[in-house]
Each structure stands twice: as structure tokens, then as C-alpha cells.
Amino acid sequence: MDKKGLAQALKQVAAAIELTDSNPFRARAYQNAARAIETSPYSLEELVLQDKARGLRGIGPAMLERIQEYYTHGQLVSQQGLLEGVPMGLWELLTIPGLGTKRVRTLYDTLEISSLSELEYACQENRLLELPGFGPKLQANVLTGLHQVRARAGQVLLPEAKQLADYWLEQVRQWPGVVRAEVTGDVRRSAPLTNCVALLLGVNEPPDEVLQTLSSLSAELNWTGGEGDLVEEQKGLAELTTDLPSGPALKIFLCQASQFAYHWLFTTGSEAHLAALRERGLSATAEQQQASSETFIYEQLGLPFIPPIIREDGDEVVWAAAGQLPMLVQTSELTGMLHVHTTYSDGAHSLAEMAAAAAARGYAYLGIADHSQTASYAGGLTPAQVQQQWQEIDSLNQARAGARLLKGIESDILPSGALDYDDELLAGFDFVIASVHSSLRQPAEQMMPRLLAAIAHPAVTMLGHPTNRLLLGREES
Ligand SMILES: [Zn+2]
């Protein structure tokens, strides 16, 4: 729960008002409030506990109540009725790039479209062409966007997948007969995206018998499973699968506790990693199946233990065989962080809170890099605000109130390749990150000189998010 969540909740209400055709002025009030909160320099705590929300432009008595409501309940309880009045499928349609509330409403009102499949069908029939404000180009873009949305369905980012895995791990460890339980699959390999959270359970009874008991224990989860489509080498493994409400599948593998290491290796994957191991002799020998640890199996294959996070395309097996596994950076080795945002632009926490949080993680420094002035949608800093932030950083550093703060900025790279402040101001920063946030679709012939010009600027220390990929949001370019 933070101010981003609050702004998101207010925007959702605005969208619901627009989708159900209530009062447009009310929708605007929610949008304005969301914007005022996003661009304000305050965290959620400051907005509520220090009453900083009062006096922000666009925040009246009704919005103050909403903010309080969100702070107390984590959601806008008074607006739940309105949100539930929106046909479920319309929210999904809104995730397609190019479809705002107005167009989604038109689709719903005129063609009665309220799901991705109905929309796909309508596009194929060219039905969108007849609608006001639509055209062949938009219809083509909608179809592309629709396919992207569908490909992402059920996928979640690693942090969410980890949370789900941890939650379920705690549950299954209390199930009867379970002697060992661990996270496996994509999440164990720290895959950035997954549509499946998998756990491996070791049991002493035959796995399919335990499976019967377990599935009846939690029948409300609508498990499917059995021995399914497991490969030959995974004999002795049973599985249960269910779809979690938040999207991904939850898959529970059960094996004899004595074969845990062997099945852990197999359920962790990846496919390419296992294929490379098979070439070196991985097979279902009794010795491998009864291995006491994964390390033992790797040793049998003449390899050192390979950390799950790099078990990806099989190359890691080649490196391991040559004694050239990379040394992986450990979280405990991090001494600081660059490129963080604060409430000066679109971050959720104040400078002081960020400094304290960095110190709490044991960091020696934290590089502040809020957005620059052209990024007005993200509350980019004017030169005056930059000066103000520098003063605040100086006083926090003097007070030793947390990790040492570095004065940085995430400067937009303008379409021309120029940076977003004059050279004199730029020279005053400890570091400058240069990033592209607009005109993302420039052809390579324009984009490349633009990036090169930015990198060549003497003030620039590093390039921000070079491909502009946004996991589950935007393809890289
Ligand atoms: Zn950025």
C-alpha cells in the first residue's frame, strides 16, 4: 500500500465511471486527484498522517475521504459497488494498447463486445471499421495488442510469483505426510516471468496415495492431476494443478522423499539445461534417483553444482564442464543502488524514507535519480526543484540520517538526442542517467544517432533501460 496504489485505485474509479457512463465531471475529479497525488512530493503516510493531501490542487473534501479510506482499508470500499457494476471483460479490453474507456464503451454499446474472444472475432470480420473513431490501422493495432495480452495471460512477474510460492510453501509444509517441501520450476530459477508456481513435496507413503488425500483436503481448489504428461524419467512423480485466482497455475509435485534431489533437479528445469545434462549422462539410474543432493548428481556427471538461476539455455553446462562458471553477485554483496525515484517525481517515498530504507539494507550509498522536466507525466523536476532537492540531500547527508545520498537525475533524451537541462545544471549532478521515454517508435536510423548523441554528452554517466522493454507491458525495441 503506497501512494502509487492510491493513485491507481482513483484511476480505476475514474475508468469505472466512464465505462458505466455516469457523470463525466466526477470521472475528471478522480483523474485530477490521481494526478495531483502522483506528482505531489509526499508519500502516502505524509498525505494522510501529516494531512499534506489537504491543499493539493484538485483534492476536495470528498477526495480527502477517499484517501483516508484507502489508507485505512487498502481499497476504496465505498466505490466497490461502482467497480462491480463494470462487466468483468471490459477491464481486460482496457489493457489493450490503443483502447481507452471511450473506445471500449463504443465496442460494448454498439457491438456488445465484452471479452477478448468477441473482440478478436469482430476484428476478423472487420466490424471495427464501421465504428466512429476507428479505422483499419487501429483495428490492426488492436488485433496485435490483443494477441500480446493473450500471450501474457496468467503470467506474473517474479516478485509476485515468489510471494505466491512462499505462501503456498508455508501451507503445504503443514499438510499431513509431507516430510520436505521446496520451491521448484521457474520460480526456483528466478525466471522474470512465469505462468506456473511449482512446489515439490517429498513424502514417505506412495505419492499417488498421498495425492488422493491432499486433493480431498483442499477440494475447493479444483485440483486436476494424476501422473499426467510427465516424461519417462519422472516416473514416481505425481502432480496436482490448479489455477490461482491471480492468474498463474499452482503445480504441486509429489515424490518419495528418498528421491527428492533427483526430482528437484528435473522439476526445476529448464528443458535446455536438462537436455545438456542428459548429453553428459543424466538418466534415471538408481544411483541418481536415490541421490542425497543435487550436488551429488552434478558430481556424477563430472560437474560442479550449477546454481538454479543460470540453468537456462544449456551453455552453463559447457561453462561448468570447463571450470568456467561465472561468479554470481550475491544480494549481500550489494553496497548501494542507483536509479531510484522519490516523491519529487513519481516515486512512492520521500528522500528521507529512501535514505533510511537504504541504510536498513546495509547500503553505503543511494543514487537518487528522479525524472527530468520534460517527463511531466511523471512529475519531472524543474531546475528550481532540482536545486531544492540538492539542498535537502545536503542536509540529510550532513545529518547522517541514512545511507549517503548521491545527487543524480534520470534525464530524458529528447527526440533530437539533446538532454533535458542546460549543461551548467547537468554539471552539478554526481551522476546522470540518460533515458528515452518519448518517441519510442522512432526508426533505428533516428534512434541510434539519438542514443549516441546522448552517450557522447560529457555529463552522462549511464544509459537507462536501453531496450525500453517493460515486462508484461511493452515489447523491447
Ligand atoms: Zn525511465
Image (cartoon, grey):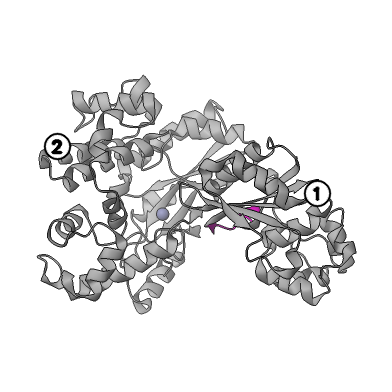
**Residue closer to the observer: 249 or 55:** 249
Is 24 within the magenta? no
Residue 465 can be seen in this image: yes
Q: Kindly identify the residue that appears in the image at 23 percent across and 41 percent down.
A: 85
Q: CA distance from mark 1 to mark 2?
A: 60 Å
Q: Which span of residues is magenta-colored?
A: 187-194
Q: Kindly identify the residue that appears in the image at 79 percent across and 77 percent down.
A: 279
Question: Which quadrant of the picture is home to ligand 1?
Answer: bottom left
Camera-near label (1 vs 2) is 1
Specify the quadrant of the image occupied by residue 346.
top left
Location of residue 55 in the rendering, given as x and y in whole percent from the top left corner = 22, 25
Is 189 within the magenta? yes
Q: Kindly identify the residue that appears in the image at 10 percent across and 39 percent down.
A: 23
Residue 468 can be seen in this image: no
* Disc 2 crowd, CA 10 A, few/some/many (<14, 14-19, 20+): some
Assign a secondary structure to mark 1: helix
- Figure quadrant of the N terminus: top left
From this view, report whether residue 316 is shown above or below residue 175: below
> Would you name the residue on which mark 1 appears?
257
**Residue closer to the observer: 476 or 88:** 88
> Would you name the residue on which mark 2 appears?
26
- Figure quadrant of the C terminus: bottom left
Q: Is mark 1 within 8 Å of ligand 1?
A: no
Location of residue 111 in the rendering, given as x and y in whole percent from the top left corner = 16, 62
* Disc 1 crowd, CA 10 A, few/some/many (<14, 14-19, 20+): many
| Three-letter code for the amino acid on which mark 1 is drawn | Ala
Location of residue 266 in the rendering, given as x and y in whole percent from the top left corner = 72, 62
Q: Kindly identify the residue that appears in the image at 53 percent across and 25 percent down.
A: 399
Left or right: residue 351 versus residue 442 is: right
